[in-house]
Image (spheres, rainbow, N blue to C red):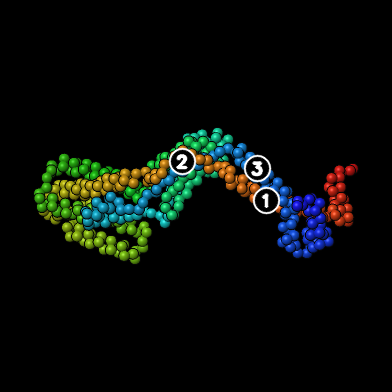
Amino acid sequence: MNTTTSEIRHLESETLPSSAPGIQENDEVSVLEILIVLARRKWLILKFTVGFGVLALVVSLLLPKKYTAITTVMPPQQNSSLTSALMSQVGGSLGSLTALAGSSIGLKNPNDMYVAMFKSRTVEDAMIQRFGLMDEYHEKYMSTTRKAFESHATVEATTKDNLIHISVEDRNAKRAAEMANAYVEEYRRLSQHLAIGEAAQRRLFFEQQLEQAKNNLADAEEALKETEQKTGMIQLDSQARALIESAVTLRAQIAAKEVQLQSIKTYATSENSDVIQTQQELDSLRTQLAKLGGNVDDSAGLIIPKGQMTQGGIEYVRRYRDVKYYETIFEILARQFELAKLDEAKEGALIQVVDLAIVPDYKSFPKRGIITIVAAAVGLIIGIFAAFFRESMERLEQDPEQSERLRILRKLIWARKTA
């Protein structure tokens, strides 16, 4: 037997009388009463739910599509340098100097530095100019365009895989991939002018020292030439040559050890064991040089007794000794400079591309399914509130006293202001 509308109304009036505890009263509302109200207003709730869902779907269809392209890069890994491997075979103070210069200059989290460089103003401005983003984002100023670009581009360094992920969002799928790959290119252009890596740091250091040694050697050779022309002496005996070469080797070792000690003191105190050991080695080398009659601080010191040579010969020995000394220093620095260049070439552009961005085949925005589901859920909640509100209003209208108050409230709300 079918239930008629009048019977349903009769059942509701018996179940929820106006004087019964319910929404009208402030007493506790039972779960059954709530379910009855929801069942009675199910069509209203359904209208809100479906309405919000359909509206969200229509809006999502009208929203412009956006695509996200992702490039994955790997920052430089900490490994043993070519210079350290080759120069470790040399031994002595030269190997110690190279080992010091080849020490790691890493950060606690070096990936943060690379992410910051990707987000630098130089790289972002280059991207804006390269792709004409001021017109694309309809911005008049570079600062606002930069902020708009940052909202479309993301650079993240994940600790899980130790990689850097660069994602760029754009309305055009092809351009999104081009921008993601160009991001890496612009970063590389910036890094070419910066000494970021360990090898680049060493290359700059040895390049500066090599230039200074080159100038010193040229001056010493010019002074020796003038001495030869003035004294007419162009060759030394074997004993004097051996003494000079021995002293020159010691002076070069002392110079290298002094550079090493100075570098250690930049990050260690005088009580540090490395400082003490290096200082002792330096003192030992100076003592050996002193036994040969040389002086590391004064190039005028002689290596052989003065009584065995004429004044012209002594002058020639001094100049010859200076030339050999600067030649030795130049050879050491030149060798280390070339090895540092090899290390820098080994590092390449500092980062390696793991995955190039490809043209995305599916949009990343709008996500119509999620938008529709969320909007429908919001409509459901609003529909439930609307159902209880309408139920309360109908019960208030059933009460003559409350109905009169509602009438007065409506009249006051819609009444026009009079003079």
Q: Which mark is residue 54?
A: 3
- 177 lies left or right of 255: right
What type is the residue that disc 3 sits on?
Val
Q: Secondary structure at mark 2?
A: helix
Residue at left offset 48%, top offset 44%: 167
Residue 267, compared with residue 355, is above or below; it is: below
Cα–Cα span, label 1 and label 3: 13 Å
- Please state if 7 lies on the left or on the right of 311 as rendered: right
Residue at mark 2: 180
Q: Is residue 309 left or right of residue 405?
A: left
Q: Quadrant of residue 92?
A: bottom left
Across and down, in percent, residue 12 comes to: 79, 56
Which of pointers 2 and 3 lies earlier in the amino acid sequence?
3
Q: Where is residue 245 shown, x and y percent of the image?
A: 16, 51
The amino acid type, in three-letter code, at marker 1 is Leu
The residues bearing labels 2 and 3 have C-alpha atoms spaced at a distance of 35 Å
SS at mark 1 in the image: helix
Residue at 27% x, 53% y: name it: 84
Q: Amino acid at mark 2?
A: Ala
Which x, y percent locates residue 222?
22, 41
Q: Which is nearer the eye, 299 or 379?
A: 379
**Mark 1 = which residue?**
380
